[in-house]
Structure formats: structure tokens, C-alpha cells
Image: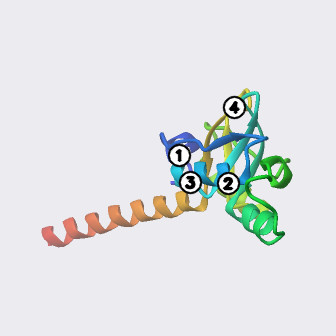
Amino acid sequence: MPNRRVKEVIGKRSVPTAGITTTIREAAKIMKQCRSSAIMVVDKGTLVGICTERDIVFGVVAEDLDPDKTGLAKIMTRKVQTIAPDKPFGHALHIMYEGGFRHVPVVDHAGYPVGLVTPQDALDIDALQLHQDLVRREEITTIL
């Protein structure tokens, strides 16, 4: 499973993006709508940062900042480690592990965001593998 391409793992999920002037409240609404724990910040279509739930909690809520007046540019992570869609999913997991990240933006050759890899993706693959193993065992049991 780690050899699957990133684009196969992320599939056709919606890509949560917002501009650098987007407020934290607006970004949180986009994240909720996309059911995502992070939002990719773009400027002129290319990725310039990422903002996660954790960034919002620690950077806005814990600092008593106004989510209606605070923009993503204030709290986003600017130097973002990314991955190309044609790379192996195992490489994305390695990036997350080595960097201590929970999200890795997937960008095309022009830097345009096309998806987001999360630890949930690894769990989904494990669940799929478990299901396949259980089906196989059931088939073997039926034969025996």
C-alpha cells in the first residue's frame, strides 16, 4: 500500500483553499464545509502556506485574537513541505514522520494545490487492507 501514488490515495476529495487575506472565521467555515483539519493558503493560485486546526487553537484562541479580524497570513505556516501527486504515498508518510507534520499539501508542477495528505489516509489504507484480509479469511474458512 505505501507504493500507491499520492493521487490515488487523495482521490477526488475537495481541496480546502483560501487567500492570504481570508479571516480565521472564514477559513474555519471552509474547513468545516470540506471536512478538513487544515486549509491551504494560496496567492495567485499557488501555495504560500497552510493553516491547521492546531494553528487556530494555539495562534488565535489561546492568544485571544479576534477570528473576524485576524487573517490567515498572521498564523499560517509559510515554509510548507509539499509532495507531488505522482510520488509514492509512503514518501508522504515519511515526510510527515520526519517533519512532525500532520498534513502534507499535494501540489502540481506549477505549485497549485491539488490535495492534502493526512494521517487519516494511512488509517483508511490500513482499514481497507484489514477488510480485504477478513474477506480472504472468510473465503478460506468457507472452503475448508
Mark 1 secondary-structure assignment? helix
**As drawn, is 3 to the left or to the right of 54?**
left
- Residues packed near mark 4 inside 10 Å, few (<14), some (14 to 19) or many (20 plus): some
Q: Are marks 3 and 4 in contact (CB under 8 Å)?
A: no
In front: mark 4 or mark 1?
4
Mark 2 secondary-structure assignment? helix
Q: CA distance from mark 4 to mark 2?
A: 24 Å
Give the quarter of the image for residue 134.
Answer: bottom left
Residue at (26, 64) in percent of width and height? 135
Decide which of 127, 88 is in the foreground and name it: 127
Q: CA distance from mark 3 to mark 4?
A: 24 Å
- The percent position of residue 59, horizontal first and vertical second, equals 81, 64
What residue is pinned by disc 2?
25
- The percent position of residue 41, horizontal first and vertical second, equals 73, 42
Which badge, 4 or 2, comes first in the chain's sequence? 2
- The percent position of residue 98, horizontal first and vertical second, equals 77, 62
What residue is pinned by disc 4?
112
What residue is pinned by disc 3?
2
Name the kind of residue labelled 3 in the image.
Pro
Task: Specify whether residue 136 is in view.
Answer: yes
The disc label shown at residue 10, or none: 1
Which badge, 4 or 1, comes first in the chain's sequence? 1
Which badge, 3 or 4, comes first in the chain's sequence? 3
